[in-house]
Protein backbone atom coordinates (compact mmCIF):
# COMPACT_ATOMS: atom_id res chain seq x y z
CA UNK A 1 0.00 0.00 0.00
CA UNK A 2 2.86 2.37 0.78
CA UNK A 3 4.02 2.29 -2.84
CA UNK A 4 0.98 4.34 -3.83
CA UNK A 5 2.04 7.25 -1.63
CA UNK A 6 4.88 8.26 -3.87
CA UNK A 7 2.67 7.72 -6.92
CA UNK A 8 0.79 10.89 -6.12
CA UNK A 9 2.77 13.87 -7.34
CA UNK A 10 1.56 17.03 -6.11
CA UNK A 11 2.42 19.59 -8.59
CA UNK A 12 -0.24 18.35 -10.83
CA UNK A 13 -2.87 20.19 -12.62
CA UNK A 14 -3.19 23.73 -11.55
CA UNK A 15 -3.67 25.95 -14.52
CA UNK A 16 -0.22 26.24 -16.05
CA UNK A 17 1.55 29.61 -15.86
CA UNK A 18 4.69 29.75 -18.00
CA UNK A 19 5.81 33.33 -17.49
CA UNK A 20 8.97 34.42 -15.63
CA UNK A 21 7.34 36.09 -12.64
CA UNK A 22 7.77 35.29 -8.97
CA UNK A 23 5.03 32.99 -7.78
CA UNK A 24 4.10 30.77 -4.89
CA UNK A 25 1.87 27.72 -5.04
CA UNK A 26 0.30 25.91 -2.09
CA UNK A 27 -1.12 22.47 -2.86
CA UNK A 28 -2.91 20.04 -0.60
CA UNK A 29 -4.08 16.67 -1.90
CA UNK A 30 -6.32 14.13 -0.26
CA UNK A 31 -5.56 10.54 -1.28
CA UNK A 32 -8.18 7.82 -0.78
CA UNK A 33 -7.96 4.12 -1.60
CA UNK A 34 -10.31 1.58 -0.01
CA UNK A 35 -10.01 2.09 3.77
CA UNK A 36 -6.76 4.05 3.61
CA UNK A 37 -6.41 7.83 3.27
CA UNK A 38 -3.80 10.53 3.77
CA UNK A 39 -3.17 14.22 3.12
CA UNK A 40 -0.13 15.37 1.11
CA UNK A 41 0.81 19.07 1.10
CA UNK A 42 3.36 20.64 -1.26
CA UNK A 43 4.79 24.17 -1.26
CA UNK A 44 6.35 25.62 -4.44
CA UNK A 45 8.19 28.89 -4.94
CA UNK A 46 9.70 30.32 -8.12
CA UNK A 47 11.59 33.61 -8.26
CA UNK A 48 11.32 36.16 -11.06
CA UNK A 49 14.65 34.89 -12.45
CA UNK A 50 13.29 31.32 -12.47
CA UNK A 51 15.04 29.77 -9.45
CA UNK A 52 12.68 27.11 -8.15
CA UNK A 53 12.17 25.38 -4.78
CA UNK A 54 9.69 22.75 -3.65
CA UNK A 55 8.88 21.33 -0.20
CA UNK A 56 6.81 18.13 0.09
CA UNK A 57 5.37 16.00 2.86
CA UNK A 58 4.00 12.43 2.62
CA UNK A 59 5.08 12.32 -1.02
CA UNK A 60 7.93 9.83 -1.44
CA UNK A 61 6.60 7.96 1.60
CA UNK A 62 4.46 8.53 4.68
CA UNK A 63 6.02 10.68 7.40
CA UNK A 64 8.66 11.86 4.93
CA UNK A 65 9.69 15.46 4.20
CA UNK A 66 11.58 16.29 1.00
CA UNK A 67 13.09 19.46 -0.41
CA UNK A 68 13.90 20.10 -4.09
CA UNK A 69 15.71 22.96 -5.82
CA UNK A 70 16.57 23.86 -9.39
CA UNK A 71 16.12 26.42 -12.12
CA UNK A 72 13.30 26.64 -14.68
CA UNK A 73 13.99 27.12 -18.39
CA UNK A 74 11.09 28.69 -20.30
CA UNK A 75 10.51 29.46 -23.94
CA UNK A 76 8.14 29.39 -26.85
CA UNK A 77 5.51 31.76 -28.12
CA UNK A 78 2.33 30.12 -29.37
CA UNK A 79 3.65 26.90 -27.87
CA UNK A 80 4.95 27.80 -24.43
CA UNK A 81 7.08 25.39 -22.46
CA UNK A 82 9.04 25.08 -19.23
CA UNK A 83 11.64 22.54 -18.10
CA UNK A 84 12.90 22.38 -14.51
CA UNK A 85 15.80 20.05 -13.60
CA UNK A 86 15.79 19.43 -9.84
CA UNK A 87 17.86 17.84 -7.14
CA UNK A 88 16.29 16.91 -3.82
CA UNK A 89 16.73 15.13 -0.53
CA UNK A 90 14.18 13.34 1.65
CA UNK A 91 14.22 12.59 5.38
CA UNK A 92 11.83 10.48 7.40
CA UNK A 93 10.51 7.01 6.65
CA UNK A 94 12.19 7.33 3.25
CA UNK A 95 15.65 8.88 3.31
CA UNK A 96 17.68 9.55 0.21
CA UNK A 97 18.72 11.70 -2.74
CA UNK A 98 16.49 12.40 -5.76
CA UNK A 99 17.13 13.65 -9.29
CA UNK A 100 14.02 15.01 -10.98
CA UNK A 101 12.72 16.87 -14.03
CA UNK A 102 9.44 18.77 -14.29
CA UNK A 103 8.26 19.67 -17.80
CA UNK A 104 5.19 21.54 -19.05
CA UNK A 105 3.88 22.70 -22.42
CA UNK A 106 0.83 24.72 -23.41
CA UNK A 107 -0.72 25.47 -26.80
CA UNK A 108 -4.00 27.35 -26.93
CA UNK A 109 -6.40 25.29 -24.76
CA UNK A 110 -4.20 22.18 -24.75
CA UNK A 111 -1.65 21.46 -22.04
CA UNK A 112 0.76 18.66 -21.18
CA UNK A 113 2.96 17.99 -18.18
CA UNK A 114 5.42 15.39 -16.98
CA UNK A 115 7.14 14.96 -13.63
CA UNK A 116 9.86 12.35 -13.29
CA UNK A 117 12.25 11.44 -10.52
CA UNK A 118 14.83 8.83 -9.61
CA UNK A 119 15.20 8.49 -5.85
CA UNK A 120 18.14 6.66 -4.32
CA UNK A 121 17.62 5.33 -0.80
CA UNK A 122 20.34 5.74 1.82
CA UNK A 123 19.24 2.49 3.45
CA UNK A 124 18.78 -0.29 0.88
CA UNK A 125 18.82 -0.50 -2.90
CA UNK A 126 15.40 -2.17 -2.75
CA UNK A 127 13.85 1.12 -1.58
CA UNK A 128 15.22 3.13 -4.53
CA UNK A 129 12.68 3.86 -7.25
CA UNK A 130 11.93 5.63 -10.51
CA UNK A 131 8.60 7.42 -10.92
CA UNK A 132 6.95 9.51 -13.60
CA UNK A 133 3.54 11.18 -13.80
CA UNK A 134 2.33 12.46 -17.18
CA UNK A 135 -0.79 14.37 -18.18
CA UNK A 136 -2.49 15.64 -21.31
CA UNK A 137 -5.47 17.93 -20.85
CA UNK A 138 -7.80 20.46 -22.38
CA UNK A 139 -9.23 23.66 -20.88
CA UNK A 140 -12.91 23.59 -21.72
CA UNK A 141 -13.27 27.21 -20.56
CA UNK A 142 -11.61 29.65 -18.16
CA UNK A 143 -13.11 27.59 -15.34
CA UNK A 144 -13.13 23.91 -16.33
CA UNK A 145 -10.43 21.48 -17.48
CA UNK A 146 -10.19 17.74 -18.06
CA UNK A 147 -7.81 15.14 -19.45
CA UNK A 148 -5.85 11.89 -19.10
CA UNK A 149 -3.12 11.00 -16.61
CA UNK A 150 -0.62 8.17 -16.46
CA UNK A 151 1.67 7.02 -13.65
CA UNK A 152 4.62 4.69 -14.04
CA UNK A 153 6.73 3.35 -11.18
CA UNK A 154 9.78 1.11 -11.23
CA UNK A 155 10.56 -0.28 -7.77
CA UNK A 156 13.19 -2.98 -7.38
CA UNK A 157 12.22 -5.66 -9.93
CA UNK A 158 8.60 -4.61 -10.26
CA UNK A 159 6.88 -2.09 -12.54
CA UNK A 160 3.48 -0.45 -12.08
CA UNK A 161 1.52 1.32 -14.80
CA UNK A 162 -1.61 3.18 -13.69
CA UNK A 163 -3.78 5.12 -16.16
CA UNK A 164 -6.35 7.64 -15.00
CA UNK A 165 -8.67 10.54 -15.72
CA UNK A 166 -8.89 13.99 -14.21
CA UNK A 167 -11.23 16.97 -14.23
CA UNK A 168 -11.23 20.18 -12.29
CA UNK A 169 -12.33 23.72 -11.65
CA UNK A 170 -10.33 26.96 -11.76
CA UNK A 171 -11.64 30.00 -9.93
CA UNK A 172 -9.43 33.06 -9.64
CA UNK A 173 -6.26 31.82 -7.87
CA UNK A 174 -7.83 28.56 -6.72
CA UNK A 175 -7.77 25.20 -8.48
CA UNK A 176 -9.75 22.06 -7.57
CA UNK A 177 -8.42 19.02 -9.50
CA UNK A 178 -9.91 15.54 -9.04
CA UNK A 179 -8.30 12.30 -10.26
CA UNK A 180 -9.35 8.68 -10.52
CA UNK A 181 -6.68 6.05 -11.23
CA UNK A 182 -7.10 2.41 -12.22
CA UNK A 183 -10.80 3.08 -12.93
CA UNK A 184 -11.44 -0.38 -14.40
CA UNK A 185 -9.59 -2.48 -11.81
CA UNK A 186 -8.99 -1.06 -8.33
CA UNK A 187 -10.01 2.62 -8.58
CA UNK A 188 -8.62 5.13 -6.14
CA UNK A 189 -9.05 8.88 -5.89
CA UNK A 190 -6.98 12.03 -5.42
CA UNK A 191 -8.68 15.35 -4.68
CA UNK A 192 -6.79 18.64 -4.54
CA UNK A 193 -7.20 22.15 -3.23
CA UNK A 194 -4.54 24.50 -4.64
CA UNK A 195 -3.85 28.19 -4.30
CA UNK A 196 -1.42 30.24 -6.40
CA UNK A 197 -0.01 33.70 -5.66
CA UNK A 198 1.75 35.71 -8.35
CA UNK A 199 4.04 38.50 -7.18
CA UNK A 200 4.42 41.61 -9.29
CA UNK A 201 7.92 42.64 -10.25
CA UNK A 202 9.27 45.64 -8.43
CA UNK A 203 9.88 48.73 -10.52
CA UNK A 204 13.49 49.75 -11.04
Image (tube, helix red, strand yellow):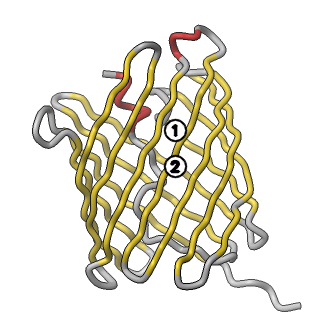
Q: Is residue 149 left or right of residue 6?
A: left
**Horizontal and vertical percent position of residue 14:** 43, 66
Please rate how many residues cluster around mark 2, counting C-alpha atoms within 10 Å: few if below 14, some from 14 to 19, many from 20: many
Looking at the image, which residue is at 68% across and 64% down? 46
Secondary element at image label 1: strand
Circles 2 and 1, Cβ within 8 Å, touching? The answer is yes
Residue at label 2? 42
Comparing 106 with 33, the one in front is 106
Q: Is residue 44 left or right of residue 158?
A: right
Query: Which of disc 1 and disc 2 is earlier in sequence?
Result: 2
Secondary element at image label 2: strand
**Horizontal and vertical percent position of residue 13:** 40, 61
**Horizontal and vertical percent position of residue 169:** 29, 72
Q: Which image quadrant for residue 107?
A: bottom left
Looking at the image, which residue is at 16% across and 30% down? 34
How far separated are the C-alphas under marks 2 and 1? 7 Å
Comparing 17 with 53, the one in front is 17
Q: Examine the rendered structure and indicate whether residue 34 appears above or below residue 171.
A: above
Residue at label 1? 57
Location of the C terminus (image quadrant): bottom right
Q: Is residue 182 left or right of residue 69?
A: left
Single out the residue that lies furthest toward the left.
184
Q: Which image quadrant for residue 123?
A: top right
Amino acid sequence: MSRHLFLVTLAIIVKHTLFAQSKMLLENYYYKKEDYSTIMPVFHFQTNNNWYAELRYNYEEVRTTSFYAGKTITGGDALGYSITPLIGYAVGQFRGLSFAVNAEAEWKSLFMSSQSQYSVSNRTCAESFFFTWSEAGYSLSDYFFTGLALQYTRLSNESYLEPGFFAGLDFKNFSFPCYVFDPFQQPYFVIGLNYEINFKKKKD
